[in-house]
Amino acid sequence: MAEVLVLVEHADGAVKKVSLEALTLARSQGEPSAVVCGAPGSAAALHDRLAEYGAAKVYVAESDDIEAYLVAPKAEVLAQLVEQVSPVCVVVPSTNEGKEIAGRLAIKIGSGLLTDVTEVDGDGTATQVVFAGAVIVKSTVSTGTPIYTLRPNSIAPAAASGAAEEHTVEVAVSDAAKATAVTERVVETKTSRPELTEAAIVVSGGRGVGSAENFSIIEGLADALGGAVGASRAATDSGFYPHQFQVGQTGKTVSPQLYLAAGISGAIQHRAGMQTSKTIVVINKDAEAPIFELADFGVVGDLNKVVPALTEEVTKRKG
Ligand SMILES: Cc1cc2nc3c(=O)[nH]c(=O)nc-3n(C[C@H](O)[C@H](O)[C@H](O)COP(=O)(O)OP(=O)(O)OC[C@H]3O[C@@H](n4cnc5c(N)ncnc54)[C@H](O)[C@@H]3O)c2cc1C
């Protein structure tokens, strides 16, 4: 069976969820081959997880040069592998880094690229959801080896065991790929909460929360439920919560088991980032708020009363 190259995104010795989704998608196109780029020694910790999600092979491209320069070395590794193994297609996570790598790869190998795809049919036809979910586009790549960037949280990752046979890739980074060097890395301060795009439960607050201080009630409920905190753009633009927690068209896309929206009206741009959540619970004082159209459960009421009461009840039941 023809190989499908899947670029693995990883951090702190763990495979990112979007890469498990990409391996799941790859299995519908051929035999998934995971491509791990990183500093020497980074692939070992990822091996079992990649095997668990069906990687038949793992191409290990380890070099200090991969860490020392921005995305260009990773695009070179992929281009080299495309030449060597003639894959049926290449799947890359649709993250900022992934999209830049995919664009560079497309130029290097002279192939067509489809970004932000949500699924790919057996015949290679990709689906893209555009204009904040208002239009669904179906496209195929007509030139070269198709490259797809997969939008996070579009498909459920499904386990399937693979041999994950390791193959070492000789990394020879060109001078051109060394044009931009990394000069410093700053570790983002992490909370004990799960990563927003990977969380099973997300509690989001909007303009209705009213202030940065009052976001503590949203955090309180998220913590009681073991979930992540999200925010609407109105909330982040107002300085109530940091921008990296924005959910929506110009923020993060989430697809948790439970999405709880408090004080959010449900603008189309917000929906674009959360409408595929499994169960949606809404708290809004306006019974006419459009977000109720998406709700599985809705409470019409003041979030300042409802959210703390809910937190108290959840905490009580947990105890
Ligand atoms: C190009 C573009 C991209 C955008 N990208 C995004 C994006 O990525 N994400 C995003 O979220 N938005 C995005 N927006 C903005 C979007 O159009 C909306 O303006 C925004 O989502 C509104 O946020 P909100 O629902 O918090 O605020 P509002 O629309 O002001 O709604 C606040 C809600 O809170 C309710 N409320 C007020 N007080 C209480 C209370 N005490 N208790 C309960 N409920 C209360 C109100 O009834 C109301 O429904 C984008 C806009 C554009 C033009």
Image (cartoon, helix red, strand yellow):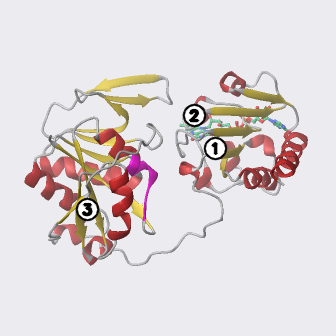
Q: Position of residue 131 (x, y in %)?
A: 47, 29
Quote the CA–CA distance across marks 3 and 2.
Answer: 32 Å
Q: Amino acid at mark 2?
A: Gln
Task: State the image coordinates of residue 266 (x, y, percent, origin top left).
Answer: 67, 30
Disc 2 target residue: 269
Q: Nearer the viewer, residue 224 or 190?
A: 224
How far across and how far down the image is residue 70, in percent? 32, 67
View quadrant of ligand 1: top right
What x and y, as percent, mark residue 270? 60, 36
> Is ligand 1 less than 8 Å from the beta carbon at label 1?
yes
- Residue drawn at (69%, 27%), measured in percent from left and top? 291
Relative to 62, say whether 74 is above or below.
above
Q: Is residue 220 left or right of residue 97?
A: right
Q: In whole angstroms, how far apart are the C-alphas of marks 3 and 1?
A: 33 Å
Instruction: Find out if the beta carbon at label 2 lies less than 8 Å from the nearest ligand 1 atom.
Output: yes
The answer to whether residue 166 is above or below residue 52 is below
> Where's the C terminus, which quadrant?
bottom right
Q: Is residue 191 shown left or right of residue 14?
A: right
Residue segment shown in magenta: 14-20
